[in-house]
Amino acid sequence: MKKVLIARVLPEGVYPALDGLEVVRRDRTTPLDDDEMRAALRDFDGVLCTLGDQFSAEVFADVPQPRCKVLANFGVGFNHIDVRAAQAVGVMVTNTPGAVTDATADTAMTLMLMSARRAGEAERLVRSGAWEGWHPTQMLGMHLTGKTVGIAGMGRIGQAIARRCHFGFEMPVRYFGRAPKELDFEAVYHSDLQEMAACVDVLVTAVPSNPQTHHLINADVLAAMQPHARLINIARGDVVEEAALIDALQRGVIGGAGLDVYEFEPLVPQALRDLDNVVLLPHLGTSTMEVRVDMGLMAVANLQAFLRGDTPPNPV
């Protein structure tokens, strides 16, 4: 019987799908440390891992002949795994695309609305007990319907966000990426990110984390944005140069931001937490029971397929 490690607590609905395997459940919510990762590679046939489990080249170098032959990642993003180093020692990596698309797009819309309508700031006002009642100029925000959205990255999630904006909020859509795409809605393609940033009211990041997208949103892009514009990040934290964003928000270079991820997560700088013109969520992108169960079942399906000798549905 194949032995597998489940590196993090999962929804209970996922565990029955592991039938037929010898399962070791690590019932903790914190990432694996380096020693745990080395032990996982040495002592198990497969590992179901997730965000924060930093399977680096150094970890693989310390276990050059691992018993583990598959890392089934719980999540679509896999920048915490050095895939090239894994493949070099014979370890396949899989992920869970598709399951996360709608939930992540919904989170983007949540942040767009919260930022535009100053919802976080407004809720803090009510909770403080200092609200003195309605008046005509109370906490005026930005009307989102009809505003122009710019999306950096028009993959599955980017398109799901664009559809919500286009069909739900009558927002003209612009997008930046490596090449134009055939879409089922009207959208304007930009090959230059700064050019796009200058002509949108909301800029949303929906790109994977890799060396090409590291600090994709930097001081130059932020400076190109309009003073009322909002930045929304539901991608990965290092896509945005956090220090540059803090400076832009402090100086009023842009109107606000909505963040679900952070460059040095879970560290969120005090300077960012002190700002009223930014909405901060604790990486809630896919945080619904239905989606997390679907993600878990997809990760297990990858694991089960590999361990019985089949090609997993979602290799990376």
Image: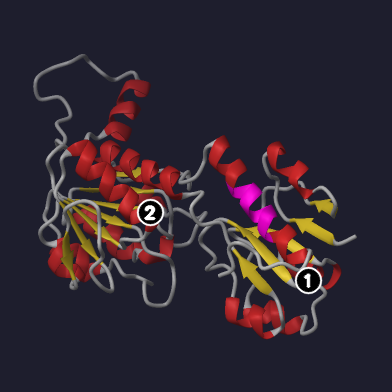
Relative to 173, 105 lies left or right: right
The image's mark for residue 157 is 2
x then y, percent, for residue 183: 25, 57
Residue 165 x, y percent position in the rendering: 23, 43
Q: Quadrant of residue 157?
A: bottom left
Location of residue 101 in the rendering, given as x and y in whole percent from the top left corner:
43, 49
Amino acid type at image mark 2: Ile
Please tell me whether mark 1 sits on a helix, a strand or a loop. Answer: loop
Q: Amino acid at mark 1?
A: Cys
Answer whether residue 277 is visible to the viewer in this image: no
Viewed as shown, does residue 126 lie left or right of 211?
Answer: left
Q: Is residue 249 above or below residue 137?
A: below
Which residue lies at the image location 28% right of the left edge and 65% below the top edge?
Answer: 244
The residue closer to the viewer here, 258 or 71, is 71
Residue in the image at 19% along x and 38% along y: 169
Q: Quadrant of the N terminus?
A: bottom right
Per the image, the residue denoted by label 1 is 68
Magenta span: helix, strand or loop, mainly?
helix
Q: Which residues are magenta?
A: 295-302
User: Could you tell me which residue is drawn at 34 percent across and 45 percent down?
Assistant: 108
